[in-house]
Image (spheres, rainbow, N blue to C red):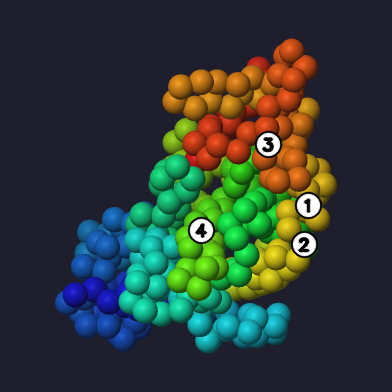
Amino acid sequence: MIRRSDRSALVRALRTDFFQSVPELARSGQLAEQAIRPLICSLQDDGLRIDQNAAGDFQLMDEVRPIDSGRLRQCLTARGFECSERVEVLDTVDSTSNWLHRQHEAGERIHGSACITEYQSAGRGRRGRQWRGSPYQHLMFSLGWEFQQPIEALSGLSLSLGVAIADQIKQTVDVQASLKWPNDLWCNNRKLGGILVELSSTSESGIRSIIGVGLNIREPHLSNLVADQGVTDLASEAQSAIPPREVIIADVLMAVVNRLTTFPLRGFISDRQRFNDLDVFKNRPVSAMSSVSEIFGTGLGADERGRYCLRRPDGSVAHIDAAELSFSLRDNHAQRATSP
């Protein structure tokens, strides 16, 4: 059986500047020789480019560096993250949110628990669409959190988290992300990342949430990420070298925790103006389409409850909160932007 830790060990052993034989890789990665080829196949299946020469030796085609768990925990501790011992770093998983669901079903309390992964085989976004990027390149995590408020009090939570993450990206990487209602991070009319908030009731009459965050940090194959829309990454948008992934992950995770901590007291209303400042739809022609109807109008931003507002051609305002609506820009010169 291929153990998850073996994949990261092999990736650390592989080089981009020369080929290595199976025995050399086994020695460098402290792995059994018979494990090398199955691990190579597993990594290739997940999108890592590994070349093989006529002698049967292997070379990594793109520079990658697995997350250093020790360094990540140091970064989190330095930022005051109180649950650093409840952070699980996985090499690969179906989805980080699914992993937390399984922990809860096994009887674990997941409040403050985070699952971070190098690769998701079944990562999902809004409306069940798949979210997948190259392994060892991005930010992918889910965080469990509990609230003692009714679900109505959590209206606009994903929008507030979007504000927190966008502002943190600006501070950490000096890239200003914009926000696409209800859960996307954008930059220069292309998708940079996404947020998925799942809520369920607890036996104590509270709300359990699992917040999934995906952020493109450095994608060698941007055109392969999502077929129906343009995508970008932080490395492409930054004007200078970006920090190590451990720093970016720690900063974004801490920004999410801070906003979750204050949200019960502040709600979305305190973030409404900032969200609307970053809104990619504001003052632009927009269509909101479901399986049975379509609404056309001009984007007005989010209201105090986090619903999106469209001014119809007749002057009336539609307040949209249906999760199944798909939003698109209708500008002739703007790239189509269908929400995942």
Q: Are marks 1 and 2 in contact (CB under 8 Å)?
A: yes
Q: Is residue 109 visible?
A: yes
Instruction: Specify whether 237 is left or right of 20.
Output: right
Q: Are marks 1 and 4 in contact (CB under 8 Å)?
A: no
Mark pair 3, 4: CA separation: 20 Å
Q: Are marks 3 and 2 in contact (CB under 8 Å)?
A: no
Instruction: Check the image and report above or below for 311 versus 324.
Output: above
Q: Are marks 3 and 4 in contact (CB under 8 Å)?
A: no
Mark pair 1, 2: CA separation: 7 Å
Question: Residue under circle 4?
Answer: 199
The numbered dot on residue 269 is: 1
Q: Are marks 2 and 4 in contact (CB under 8 Å)?
A: no
- The front one of 34 and 293 is 293
Instruction: Specify whether 117 is left or right of 237.
Output: left
Q: Return the disc, 2 or 4, that comes first in the chain's sequence.
A: 4
Instruction: Specify whether 278 is left or right of 181.
Output: right
Q: Position of residue 297 (x, y in %)?
A: 69, 21
Q: Secondary structure at mark 4?
A: strand
Q: How many marks?
A: 4
Question: Residue under circle 3?
Answer: 308
Q: Return the disc, 1 or 4, that comes first in the chain's sequence.
A: 4
In the image, what residue type sits under mark 2?
A: Arg
* Residue at x-position 75% and y-position 37%: 301
Q: Label 3: few (<14), some or many (≥20) within 10 Å? A: many
In the image, what residue type sits under mark 1?
A: Ile
From the image, which quarter does the N terminus lie in?
bottom left
